[in-house]
Image: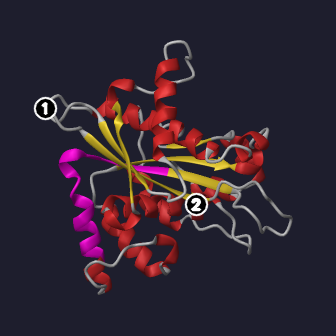
C-alpha cells in the first residue's frame, strides 16, 4: 500500500555562526520548511507551476527559484500555491540565540539535522491527525531538496538512532507509525514541483523574519500563506510554526516579528 502523504522539504538561510556587527557574515536566521500533501494530490504542484508559468509567459520547463525572482512573479507563484490543498510546517532558528553554538558549528550539518528532527515530529503529528484509513498506509514520503555536499544516509541514520532511543527519551515526540525511515530521499530542486513550492514557502518565512542590510523585513508573502500553516486544535505556534527561541522574547528584541505574525 502506498504512503498516505508526501512532504517536500527545503531550507532558507545558512548554518554558519559568523555574525559581524555590520550585518555581514552568516545569516541570522536558518529556516526549514515542509509542504505536506495527500499522496492522491501529489501532482497538483505540477499544475500550479504550469499555471504560474503561463501567467508569467515563461518557457514550459523553467524552474522557480524564489530568491532569484522579482516581487510580482513571486506573487503570481504564491497565488497559485494558495489554491492547493496543502499544509506547511516551518522550523525557525534565530541562530544568535542558540546556546553553545560551538556544538552546532563544530559538527557539520548538526543544526540541519536537529531542525529536521523538529520538522519531522510535526509532519508526523499532521499525518496522525489527518490520516484516513482508505487513503494509503498512514505514512509520509519525506523528500528533501538535495544539498550536494550532504549525505542523506546521515539523516536516515540519525532518524534511526532517534527511533531506537524513543522509548527511553520522552523528548523524542515523533509519531513513528507515520514515518518510514527507508522512504526518505533527496531530489534535485528542479526535478520536482513540490520542492520548488517548498523553496517558496521557506524563503517567504525567511524574508518575513530576517532583516535586510537596510533593516527591513517583508511579511507580505507570509500573509498569503498564513491559512495553510498546520494547526492542531486551532493552535499554529508549536505546530505549523515552531521557533527554537521563546517567541515572546524574540518579539521584544525584534518588533517586526509581532507584525509578521499578527492574528496567527
Question: How is the protein colored in the picture?
Answer: secondary structure
Name the residue rendered at 74%, 42% in the picture: 98
Q: Is residue 114 magenta?
A: no
Question: How many numbered marks, from 0 up?
Answer: 2
Query: Farthest residue in the right direction?
Result: 21
Residue for badge 1: 134
Place residue 174 in its image quadrant.
top left
Q: Residues within 10 Å of mark 2 (few under 14, many from 20)?
A: many
Q: Residues within 10 Å of mark 1 (few under 14, many from 20)?
A: few
Q: CA distance from mark 1 to mark 2?
A: 37 Å
Up-down relation of residue 75 to residue 109 (above or below)? below
Which numbered marker is on residue 206? Answer: 2
Q: Position of residue 213 (x, y in %)?
A: 74, 73
Up-down relation of residue 121 to residue 216 (above or below)? above
Residue 173 appears in the figure: no
- The magenta region covers 33-52
Name the residue rendered at 23%, 38% in the picture: 4
Is the Cβ of the residue at disc 1 closer than 8 Å to that at disc 2? no
Q: Is residue 213 left or right of residue 4?
A: right
Q: Is residue 3 left or right of residue 81?
A: left
Which numbered marker is on residue 33? Answer: none
Q: Is residue 91 left or right of residue 2?
A: right
Q: Quadrant of the N terminus?
A: top left
Q: Position of residue 250 (x, y in %)?
A: 72, 47
Q: Nearer the viewer, residue 165 or 35?
A: 165
Residue 54 appears in the figure: yes
Name the residue rendered at 40%, 31% in the picture: 125
Q: Position of residue 254 (x, y in %)?
A: 73, 55
Query: Farthest residue in the left direction?
Result: 134
Query: Farthest residue in the top direction?
Result: 168
Please tell me whether mark 1 sits on a helix, a strand or a loop. Answer: loop
Q: Nearer the viewer, residue 161 or 64?
A: 161
Amino acid at each position: 500500500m502506498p504512503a498516505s502523504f508526501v512532504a517536500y522539504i527545503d531550507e532558507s538561510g545558512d548554518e554558519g555562526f559568523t555574525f559581524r556587527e555590520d550585518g555581514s557574515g552568516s545569516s541570522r536566521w536558518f529556516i526549514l520548511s515542509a509542504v505536506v500533501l495527500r499522496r492522491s494530490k501529489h501532482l497538483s504542484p505540477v499544475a500550479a507551476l504550469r499555471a504560474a508559468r503561463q501567467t508569467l509567459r515563461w518557457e514550459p520547463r523553467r524552474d522557480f527559484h524564489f530568491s532569484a525572482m522579482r516581487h510580482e512573479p513571486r506573487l503570481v507563484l504564491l497565488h497559485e500555491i494558495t489554491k492547493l490543498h496543502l499544509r506547511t510546517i516551518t522550523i525557525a532558528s534565530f541562530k544568535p540565540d542558540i546556546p553553545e553554538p560551538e556544538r552546532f558549528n563544530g559538527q557539520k550539518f548538526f543544526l540541519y539535522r536537529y531542525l529536521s528532527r523538529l520538522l519531522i515530529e510535526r509532519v508526523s503529528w499532521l499525518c496522525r491527525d489527518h490520516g484516513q484509513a482508505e487513503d494509503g498506509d498512514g505514512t509520509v514520503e519525506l523528500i528533501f531538496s538535495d544539498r550536494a555536499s550532504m549525505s542523506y544516509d546521515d539523516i536516515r541514520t540519525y532518524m534511526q538512532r532517534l527511533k531506537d532511543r524513543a522509548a527511553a527519551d520522552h523528548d523524542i515526540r515523533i509519531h513513528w507509525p507515520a514515518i518510514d525511515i527507508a522512504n526518505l530521499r533527496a531530489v534535485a530542486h528542479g526535478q520536482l514541483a513540490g520542492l520548488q513550492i517548498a523553496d517558496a514557502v521557506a524563503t517567504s518565512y525567511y524574508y518575513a523574519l530576517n532583516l535586510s542590510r537596510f533593516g527591513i523585513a517583508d511579511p507580505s508573502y507570509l500573509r498569503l500563506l498564513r491559512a495553510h500553516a498546520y494547526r492542531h486544535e486551532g493552535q499554529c505556534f508549536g505546530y505549523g510554526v515552531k521557533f527554537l527561541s521563546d517567541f515572546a522574547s524574540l518579539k521584544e528584541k525584534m518588533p517586526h516579528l509581532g507584525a509578521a505574525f499578527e492574528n496567527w
